[in-house]
Image (cartoon, helix red, strand yellow):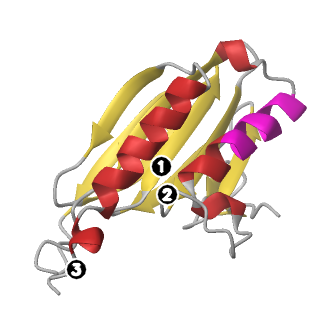
């Protein structure tokens, strides 16, 4: 089951961790990312865009949370956009986030989670033949992202949120 973003106002939809949402016309999508990756898919011809806030690279067999994982959220976002009239051939992607937020952890899998999220997202977009037109990933800082569907402009504000463990 997909989780829908919460409407902040009439024009902006807030997409929280493990959620994805699709908008049309003059709506905006907003999220805040750390090691998570935000995948924005946009269809400029139909003025339809979607945002998935991905937490982990691959879906666990025991977890049915589709929006949480790159390998399930991206195909689900494509499907939802197609249901609203998009064609897969008209989609373009923005890949944002994937920071190294846990630099001092002794658990190396946590340290690399942002990088793994980016790698998985890019691999899946490649498999789906969706071109990446903007990438802003890595670093040791979070990001707040606002995507304006009407203009197809993305605003990225960096946040200094390094979390020592």
- Labelled pair 1, 2 in contact (Cβ < 8 Å): yes
Question: Mark 2 against mark 3, which lies toward the viewer?
Answer: 3
Q: Under tag 2, what secondary structure?
A: strand
- Residue range highlighted in magenta: 75-84
In the rendered image, which residue does mark 1 sit on? 38
Please report the residue visible at 20 percent of the width from the left and 60 percent of the height from the top: 141
Which residue is situated farthest in the left direction here? Answer: 104
In the rendered image, which residue does mark 3 sit on? 107
Choose between 115 and 151: the one closer to the eye. 115
- Residue 68 in magenta? no
In the rendered image, which residue does mark 2 sit on? 31
Choose between 15 and 97: the one closer to the eye. 97
Q: Which mark is residue 93?
A: none
Pointer 2: residues within 10 angstroms few (<14), some, or many (20+)? Answer: many
Where does the image place residue 27, in percent across and percent down from the top left?
Answer: 68, 40
Q: Quadrant of residue 140?
A: bottom left
Question: Mark 1 against mark 2, which lies toward the viewer?
Answer: 1
Seen in the picture, residue 158 relative to 108 is either above or below; the reply is above
Among the two numbered marks 1 and 2 on one chain, the one whose residue lies closer to the N terminus: 2
């Amino acid at each position: 089951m997909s989780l829908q973003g919460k409407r902040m106002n009439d024009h902006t939809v807030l997409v929280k961790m493990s959620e994805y949402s699709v908008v049309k016309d003059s709506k905006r999508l907003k999220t805040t990312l750390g090691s998570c990756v935000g995948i924005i898919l946009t269809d400029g011809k139909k003025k339809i865009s979607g945002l998935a806030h991905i937490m982990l690279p691959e879906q666990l067999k025991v977890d049915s949370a589709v929006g949480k994982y790159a390998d399930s959220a991206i195909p689900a976002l494509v499907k939802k956009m197609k249901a609203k009239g998009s064609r897969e051939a008209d989609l373009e992607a923005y890949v944002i986030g994937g920071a190294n937020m846990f630099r001092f952890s002794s658990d190396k899998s946590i340290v690399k989670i942002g990088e793994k999220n980016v790698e998985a997202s890019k691999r899946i977009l490649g498999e789906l033949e969706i071109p990446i037109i903007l990438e802003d990933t890595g670093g040791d800082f979070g990001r707040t992202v606002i995507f304006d569907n009407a203009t197809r402009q993305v605003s990225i504000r960096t946040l200094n949120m390094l979390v020592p463990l």
